[in-house]
Amino acid sequence: MWLLLPMNIICLALVWRLLHQKRKIIGFHTGMNIVMSISGFFSLLIGFILISFYPYSFLEITMVTMIIGGIAGGLFGGLFEYQTFLMGTVNGLMTGLMAPMIGSVIQQEMFLYSLQALFLFLLLFIQYMVVRT
Amino acid sequence: MKIDILIGLGLFIWCLWLCYQKKSLIDERIGTVFTFVIAYMYSFHFAFHFAYFYPSRWYVFVGIAILVGTLIGILFRLHTILLGISIGTIGTTGGIMLQITLSNPAVCGIQSSFSSSQILVCSIILTVTLCMFTVLLLLSYKRL
């Protein structure tokens, strides 16, 4: 399961690079939806993965997830506008706050794997959408 | 609880039908807002009620998140599908969280417990909120 963490970061970096190249031709609404999806899903996954490894460090994991989610949202939101930057950061922070809670309640690996599959599908979908734009 | 699910299902199908009918009048901005609110409200509602009956069936929740988000998002634009799925997932996790907190508070570190009638009242409040939300949505459709 440890592999999921670097794999997600690498996938996210690749998508960020693609979005950086095409940021001039992506509209505001599309950009906003991309930022919200990525920041929400990424912080949810990070929270799930980290809390499954350190179930007794709830406070630390919540803080780390919040920071990572906020940074990821800010990085993606910063590609487009100040509004998307704000939205991405806040969404990442809020979902990061919620993710360890739900991770500690639902201790099912299959739920995590299905979320992971959904996240990868969304990243592929974003790539398809951006290339079509 | 089962009646609440049926009411939610009926309202959701009605919302989809309304959106489908006024599809040509709904632009990108309104489509994004509609996808956001509908995916959030309905995925939360369905997850809350399904978690009461099937608390350990993870695939039901993932199914709700994908179905609700995709069905509403597909009516407008390509990027609204993306928004629908992600907001559907966040709404689903919120719904599961609330149901687990109410039915098993000790898991979340809450000392007191909630009776089944209190859970029922919460469920009714959710359904009434959903009905009010759908009426508001209908009013906004009429202004299009």
Image (tube, rainbow, N blue to C red):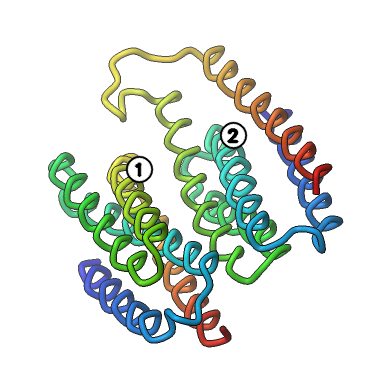
Residue at left offset 53%, top offset 49%: B61
Question: Label 2, label 1: how many angstroms apart (C-alpha)?
Answer: 17 Å
Residue A112 visible to an observer of this rendering: no
In this figure, what is the number of numbered marks? 2
The numbered disc on residue A56 is: none
The amino acid beneath tag 2 is His
Residue at left offset 33%, top offset 58%: A45
Residue B15 visible to an observer of this rendering: yes
Q: Position of residue B22 (x, y in %)?
A: 83, 56
Task: State which quadrant residue A109 falls in.
Answer: bottom left
Residue at left offset 50%, top offset 63%: A33
> In the displayed structure, does residue A22 sit left or right of residue A45?
right
Q: Where is mark 2, residue-wise?
A: B49
The verdict on a common chain for dots 2 and 1 is no
Q: Where is mark 1, residue-wise?
A: A102
Callout 1: chain: A
